[in-house]
Image: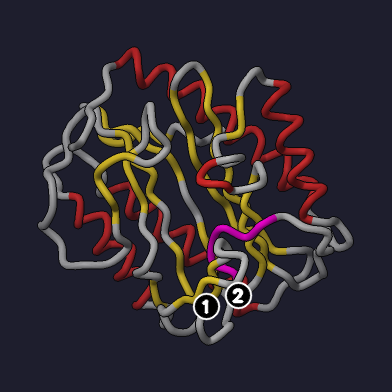
Amino acid sequence: MIIYKSSEEIEKMRRSSKIVAETLQYLIREIKAGVKTIELDKMAEDYVHGKGAEPAFKGYRGFPNTICTSINEEVVHGIPSKRELKEGDIISIDLGVFCDGYYGDAAVTIGVEKISQQAKKLLEITEKALYLGIEKAKEGNYLSDISHTIQTVAENNSFSVVKAFVGHGIGAKLHEAPQIPNFGPPGHGPKLKEGMVLAIEPMVNMGGSSVDVLEDNWTVVTSDRKLSAHFEHTIAITKNGSEILTQV
């Protein structure tokens, strides 16, 4: 069941989402060769706590950390560790925050210093797919209009979208209905209405769309071990279109 949010609830989600956005901006400035992902995790947790909020992922279904750090062929749910970033890597940082009874959730993929042109294009296209998908998130459209747009942008640039993992509704729970695939024909699924709050998150691969889950039961990698990028925003559907809540 889709839970529609009141203006008061969306205002609370603005707060949690703002903390997500500010934390990600802080972490982006710290990304460089030699930094360990566990160090980024500690920075994120301290920052979130400093804002009077709680990390949403830590302890969620047993996840051990504040952020997901997914490097190169890792798609999502990478666990922070003592692994050091190297120049040429790309890293997805995914963060959720719980504040005043509501969640915010966002992700960004960043290149570590100088990256290849192919990697740069992958990041640009994945982010473009996110924003063009968000443009479809308005009253009167259908949920799959978002999905279809993301898939079209990726595949028109010779990339593929991950089909095993999807975006989601968000509110008083981290994951709510509806699920938001990054693929499919337009004009299907629930009609978009004011008060819906969605976490839209394209996961785009340089190679094929299939993925595997590693032995840690969390880290998702591309089956062909080619690069993957992940971008996400929490957005609210209003009378005037979509408002990106997780944007500084």
- Residue 24, x across and y down, in percent: 64, 41
Q: From the image, which quarter does the N terminus lie in?
A: top left
Residue 106: in magenta span: no
Q: Which residue is mark 1?
A: 222
Query: Disc count in the image?
Result: 2
Residue 55 appears at what percent x and percent y?
Answer: 61, 33
Numbered range of the magenta stretch = 73-79
Q: Amino acid at mark 2?
A: Glu
Q: Is residue 75 magenta?
A: yes
The answer to whether any part of residue 32 appears in the image is yes
Counting from the top left corner in percent of width and height, residue 102 is at 44, 24
Residue that lies at the very extreme toward the right in this rendered image: 34
Which badge, 1 or 2, comes first in the chain's sequence? 2
Residue depicted at 27% across the width and 17% down the height? 6
Which labelled disc corresponds to residue 73? 2
Tag 1, which secondary structure? strand
Residue 101 picture location, percent across and down: 45, 19
Q: Is residue 168 placed above or below 129 in the rendered structure?
A: above
